[in-house]
Image: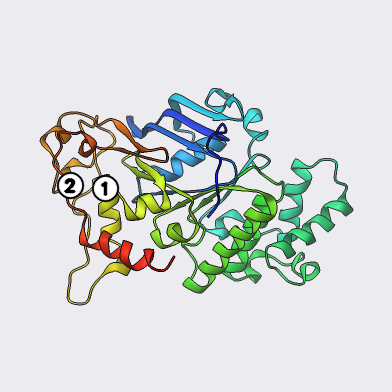
């Protein structure tokens, strides 16, 4: 884990961001007034169920929204510039790859099957580092391939993506992403398509590259085991909102929002022989409709009456921990922490 100086200005800041899409003639609000800060050198994990808005939120920071999507309101501040005001692709090309880069979930969709992997890495270098001549760019490509754990780079340079395993292809995608020494690296489910052993190797590689290249990393994942291993801070998303943010210890051992508790309770690692695995009942809300109150209320067995009537405020619990829930109101009853979360604290906390 990294020691972060939060007295400094965040390197990236999202302020009350609202993102909408036009689908079949209807408007879907995918991101609903999301606010989040990212600090230099940290690893921030964004977690939540599929459809919670994790990928949309981060793609907006690179100008990668689909053509039918737009930033309706709010700000994306990077190094003092409000990127939400960018209107043309030329503006984003100054940021994308060079300042903020992304590693996508499936390496096969990220790589061109008709080009050698060496050419694909080298093209990125030549695009963003125009001062490099062909020879220097090729040498830099060899060095990059070596840095991500690909042996014999001179031979591998000439090979095509289908000649590599899934784990090796993901290493190539990572090499392309870090080629131009970006400030921020966004990893969108970087290990989902890989087996457990390779997953661990890729996470170890990303941690190593973070130290070598002084990267600030955002992990998008639903794998809480990965989060516990790599994250300094965790942001929990539900129905397009950030509902809780805290250090990894605060989120895992002192969760506040009912949705965070539900996510932790459904961890398969915490299943006990003879007991049913906990699951989050119900489905997320329809984002085509206006949501009243707390979006998670219909799925929360301990929901308060106010949860169905009024949107809860985001409350600061500590300098690093905040949650958007009526449970933090002094008048709210105390809801006991689930037994699985207590087990998590006892089992994982004792391994620190």
| Residue 286 percent coordinates (x, y) | 25, 39
Tell me the tag on residue 259: 1
Name the residue furthest bottom.
273
Query: Is any atom of residue 102 visible in this view?
Result: yes
| Residue at which label 2 appears | 300
Give above or below for 239 relative to 254.
Answer: above
Instruction: Say few, some or many: other residues with alpha carbon within 10 Å of mark 2 (under 14 / 14 to 19 / 20 or more).
Output: some
Q: In which quarter of the image is the C terminus?
A: bottom left
Query: Is any atom of residue 65 visible in this view?
Result: no
Give above or below for 294 relative to 193.
Answer: above
| Residue 116 percent coordinates (x, y) | 72, 61
State how the image is colored.
Answer: rainbow
Give above or below for 267 relative to 311.
Answer: below
Give above or below for 35 relative to 136.
Answer: above
Q: Earlier in the sequence, mark 1 or mark 2?
A: 1
Q: Is residue 174 left or right of residue 141?
A: left
- Name the residue rendered at 39%, 59% in the picture: 224
- Name the residue rendered at 42%, 41% in the picture: 320
| Residue 91 percent coordinates (x, y) | 64, 28
CA gap between label 1 and label 2 equals 8 Å
SS at mark 1 in the image:
helix
């Amino acid at each position: 884990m990294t020691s972060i100086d939060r007295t400094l200005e965040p390197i990236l800041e999202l302020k009350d961001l609202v993102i909408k899409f036009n689908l079949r003639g209807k408007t879907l609000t995918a991101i609903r007034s999301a606010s989040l800060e990212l600090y230099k050198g940290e690893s921030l994990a964004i977690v939540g169920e599929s459809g919670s808005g994790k990928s949309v939120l981060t793609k907006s920071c690179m100008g990668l929204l689909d053509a039918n999507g737009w930033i309706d309101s709010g700000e994306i501040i990077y190094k003092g510039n409000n990127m939400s005001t960018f209107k043309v692709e030329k503006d984003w090309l100054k940021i994308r790859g060079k300042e903020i880069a992304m590693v996508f979930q499936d390496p096969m969709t990220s790589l061109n099957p008709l080009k050698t992997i060496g050419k694909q890495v080298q093209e990125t270098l030549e695009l963003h580092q125009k001062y490099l001549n062909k020879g220097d760019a090729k040498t830099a490509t060899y060095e990059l391939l070596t840095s991500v754990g690909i042996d014999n780079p001179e031979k591998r340079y000439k090979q095509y993506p289908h000649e590599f395993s899934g784990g090796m292809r993901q290493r190539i995608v990572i090499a392309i992403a870090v080629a131009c020494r970006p400030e921020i690296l966004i990893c969108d489910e970087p290990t989902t398509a890989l087996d457990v052993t390779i997953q661990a190797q890729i996470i170890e590689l990303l941690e190593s590259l973070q130290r070598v290249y002084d990267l600030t990393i955002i992990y998008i994942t639903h794998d809480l085991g990965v989060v516990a291993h790599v994250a300094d801070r965790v942001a929990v998303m539900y129905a397009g909102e950030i509902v809780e943010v805290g250090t990894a210890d605060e989120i895992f051992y002192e969760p506040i929002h009912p949705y965070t508790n539900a996510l932790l309770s459904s961890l398969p690692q915490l299943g006990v022989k003879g007991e049913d695995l906990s699951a989050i009942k119900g489905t997320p809300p329809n984002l085509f409709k206006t949501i009243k109150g707390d979006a998670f209320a219909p799925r929360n067995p301990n929901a308060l009456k106010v949860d169905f009537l009024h949107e809860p405020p985001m409350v600061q619990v500590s300098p690093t921990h905040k949650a958007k829930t009526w449970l933090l109101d002094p008048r709210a009853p105390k809801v006991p922490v689930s037994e699985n979360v207590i087990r998590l604290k006892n089992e994982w906390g004792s391994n620190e």
